[in-house]
Image (cartoon, rainbow, N blue to C red):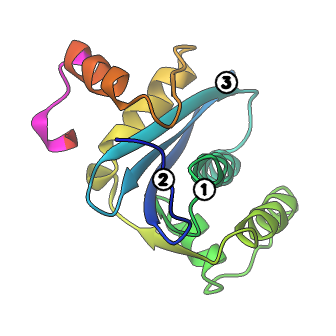
Amino acid sequence: MPLLNNATTRLTIFVDGGTAGGTHTGIAAVARSHQGYFLGWESRQLPPMSNNEAEYKAALLGLELARQLHAATCEIVSDSEILVNQMRGRSRVNSPHLQPLHQQLCHQAAYFHQVSFRYVPRAENQLADALAAEALRGRCVSLRPGHTRRLTAWLRTLSLSRKLL
């Protein structure tokens, strides 16, 4: 599938972040079209931070991916209730570590016509969770928009369940 050539296209971006014992952080974002096609993904290993900070960093990575795809509207899907509730304005951002990340995410969201946030249980965020866990171990992947054939081949080599496809 080619890059999005229509700025009115709606994307769904699944994001996740994770930490392990204060040594590293892994974040991931997976972009899907409204029709369900994978359009790209990226994972990164970052320095140690809290799990909530990692969730914010993953959402920022998701918006970065959406910008690369020239999306005007996107939905960020996360298994972090804290992130989703804070971005929806349902919860206050009291942590001094999260406040700058919240401001940065709001600033990045302003580049889009519309950005929404949706909470899902971890079981419904398996691909982003798996990519974040791999990044945590130093195995980062990047599938730039427009290279979905590589994505399909990589999924097959990992033998991920059909539920993820």
Does residue 78 show up?
Answer: no
Query: What is the x, y in percent for residue 7?
Result: 56, 66
Does residue 76 show up?
Answer: yes
Residue type, label 2: Leu
| Outermost residue to the left | 162
Residue type, label 1: His
Corner quadrant of residue 96: bottom right
Q: Secondary structure at mark 1?
A: loop
Q: Which mark is residue 70?
A: 1
Which residue is depicted at the point 26% across and 18% down? 153
Which mark is first along the chain, 1 or 3? 3
Q: Is residue 15 above or below residue 165?
A: below
The Cα atoms of the two marked residues, 2 and 1, are separated by: 6 Å
Residue type, label 3: His
Query: What is the x, y in percent for residue 41?
Result: 48, 36
Q: Residues within 10 Å of mark 2 (few under 14, many from 20)?
A: some
| Outermost residue to the front | 5
Query: What is the x, y in percent for residue 146?
Result: 46, 35
Q: Is residue 161 magenta?
A: yes
Which mark is first along the chain, 1 or 2? 2
- Residue at label 2? 4
- Residue at label 3? 24
Check contact, mark 2 vs mark 1: CB within 8 A.
Answer: yes
Residue 149 lies left or right of residue 16; in this view the side is left
